Image (cartoon, grey):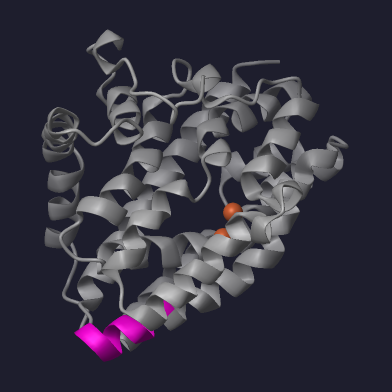
Amino acid sequence: MSALSEPMAVTAAPPQRPQQILFELNRSLPTAANLTAIERIEAQWIVPHVERLTRATSPVRSRREWLDLLHALLDEERSGSDAGRYLAEQSTRAQFTHVVREFALDGLTEAQNFFPAVPRLPIRAQMAIMRVLIDEFGCGNIMQAHSMLYADLLTELGLPCSVDDYIASTEDETYRFLNSFYWLALRAPRIEYFLGALAYLESSIPNAFRVQARACERLRIAGGRYYTEHLHIDTFHTEELQVAIREVEKVDGLDATRLWVGARLLSGLLDDAFEAAVDRARTLS
Ligand SMILES: [Fe+2]
Ligand SMILES: [Fe+2]
């Protein structure tokens, strides 16, 4: 059963897994009860987290200043991490498979949670985000859709391709990364949080995915195409996000501090999820 086809049985989930429950609620019918439950979990997690990040950030006065901060963050990340170097150069096929499995919910639902942001944007910014989304969905060609490229990778590694197969096993760090986009697109009080987060994501991937692309090359995994496709296409998506942000600035004015908080939020959540996945993979042989 697809996670989108029927309301999820969220009450059956174990109470100690609020991030799993939140993911299921985010993909359930948006009834008043479900939304209340979503807001209750978010009020104890992402809302105070964003407040903490905001308190720790000096005000960012302009788009230019935000871009300088973003480029400095990307430069810092370009040198890579021990986890990344291990995955690229030393991981076994079983260890790499573990990481692919951990991010299956992301790959299989890729970009679906961006859509609610579109009507919150001025029209020319909507066009830029739609151009990104059209690419994410393979320009309407199922064989090129990023979720299908991920499904191909899962199949090659002997893993299932249904969202439901990964609900119980996905770790909290990964769920936090996934759940953040539902809040960013739908419930963040200003759209700059979403734009800053997505601008960071699209501009970090052309460097970050070199790790997985290299691992696939080394381990002779053809499904590495999912990663190499992103090395190419996300350089264009980086530009589209800048277009969207300039348009928001022109039409509504821009809160550059919120752009930066969005970028910091996503950078931290993604780093936590990746490090945790590689750490767990390294316990396998
Ligand atoms: Fe993608
Ligand atoms: Fe992208």
Return the residue found at the far right.
Answer: 220
Residue shown at 52% from the left, 30% from the top: 277
Taking the image as drawn, is residue 78 in sight? no
Q: Residue at x 19, y 65 (%)?
A: 190
Image-based side of 284 in relation to 271, left or right: right
Q: State whether residue 255 is above or below residue 285.
A: below
Query: In percent of the image, x 49 and y 51: which residue is there?
Result: 111
Q: Main secondary structure of the magenta part?
A: helix
Q: Residue 249 in magenta?
A: yes
- Residue 242 on the magenta segment: no
Total marks placed: 0
Q: Quadrant of residue 195?
A: bottom left
Residue occupying the far bottom of the picture:
250
Q: Position of residue 211 (x, y in %)?
A: 68, 48
Left or right: 281 in relation to 77: right
Q: Nearer the viewer, residue 37 or 30?
A: 30
Q: Is residue 200 left or right of residue 214?
A: left
Image height of 247 relative to 224, above or below:
below
Point out residue 87 in the picture as x, y percentages from the top left corner: 67, 37
| Residue 203 coordinates in the image, percent (x, y) | 53, 67
Range covered by the magenta-colored residues: 244-252
Q: Is residue 109 above or below residue 144?
A: above
46 versus 76 height, above or below: above
- Quadrant containing ligand 2 reads bottom right
Q: Is residue 94 visible?
A: yes
Where residue 255 appears, as percent x and y from the top left, is 20, 77
Q: Quadrant of the C terminus?
A: top right
Q: Nearer the viewer, residue 75 or 204?
A: 204
